[in-house]
Amino acid sequence: MAASAPIAVVGGLYADVYHDPRKRGRAMAIFMAATTFGPILGPLVSGFLSRDAGWRWSFWFGLILAGVTLPFMALMPETYLPVLLARRAKKLRLETGNENFYSMSELEKKGPKHMVTVVLMRPFRMLVQEAIVLFTCMYLALAYAIFYLYFQAYPIIFQGPTSIYKMKTGISGLAFLPIGLGAALCVIIFLWYDSFLAKARKRKAAWAFVEEYRRLPLATVGGPLYVVALFWLGWSANAHVHWIVPMLSGVAFGIGFLLIFMAMINYLTDAYEIFAASAQGIASTSRSIFGALLPLAAEPMYRRLGVHWASSLLAFLSLAMAVIPFAFIKYGDRIRTNSRFCQELKRVKEKQVGEDNAEGNSADPVAAEDPEKAAKSLD
């Protein structure tokens, strides 16, 4: 549970820190690529450690890494606007002695009802009421689950005397490295497209100012590539085919997987901004559930259907989901127009722009509209 917190809040955190969508997208891209390396290096490290030093050292190694990174948490600053405004108001009260300084969030009663209706229920309400959130969660959940299913499928293909290639523990962990290479290449692709989009916006190309074209074209490439990688793995894994051929499918898999995530998660953050933490939270929850459950079916599925058709089944499911970013590009603007959350976000932004213009861009941050108050009518 504790380890899931960073993944759940990172979208909202970046939405707080980076108001420029371009900077926010780049930060998210680097974050997602970096987090991919942990899972793919795990089988390699634990394979050699468990073989040469005993299985307990796999867990000791994880504990050591967690201990090294824990102090960095103490250095993380707060980024959530209502908390920052409340702190500023408190500071002003202490400095001036004027008890009339309050932030909007302090004036709201936040008891158990607030915890249930806002913190806990809003993400689930967005899943049910928001088409963008629902279909994004579906796509990401499947892609994420297949990614973790690979940790069960690869040993069936590469590791042990009953596998196709009969590699030893540790050596078989090297099969995951092409996925990391694909993730690294994906960052380059993302940065290239980001620069291409920036140049298009600079020359006032009409398509570059459409919200859906900021991120989703990456998913229209990543989705089909993801499908190709699954078919590639399934139909090249054969004792008569060199092991490097199915391994190299991991490059396409890594590129496709990260392009899907970079595009869909960034689109979710861009579409909902102040509500991004809730949208990202339910996206994280749904994909974590699928990521835990689907790998349980890996061994029986691969044993019953065989490597060829088990991988093909996953490819066909991914092919069906690959339609989603294309649908968002065509209908996304209409969906956002009919979205209560997106319309409330638009209202808040227009109000803030109006206040800035009226006060010569000198509005007191303490008086800024609290996102939670903005969402009160929605909750």
Image (cartoon, grey):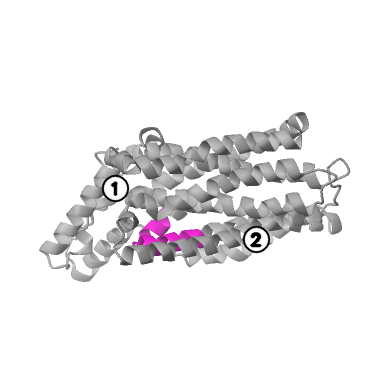
Which one is in front, 305 or 360? 305
The residue wearing badge 1 is 372
Residue ID at (53%, 57%): 32
Instruction: Identify residue type, mark 1.
Output: Glu
Locate residue 217, reporting x and y percent.
45, 51
In the rendered image, the vertical position of residue 278 relative to residue 74, given as above or below: above
Q: Residue furthest left?
A: 358
Q: Which residue lies furthest to the top in this view?
A: 304
Disc 1 residue crowd, few under 14, some 14–19, many 20+, Cα 10 Å: some
Which one is in front, 21 or 214? 214
Instruction: Identify residue type, mark 2.
Output: Leu
Could you tell whether 31 is left or right of 279 in the image?
A: right
What secondary structure is found at the residue carrying circle 2?
helix
Q: Is residue 373 visible?
A: no
Q: Is residue 21 visible?
A: yes
Which one is in front, 222 or 128? 222
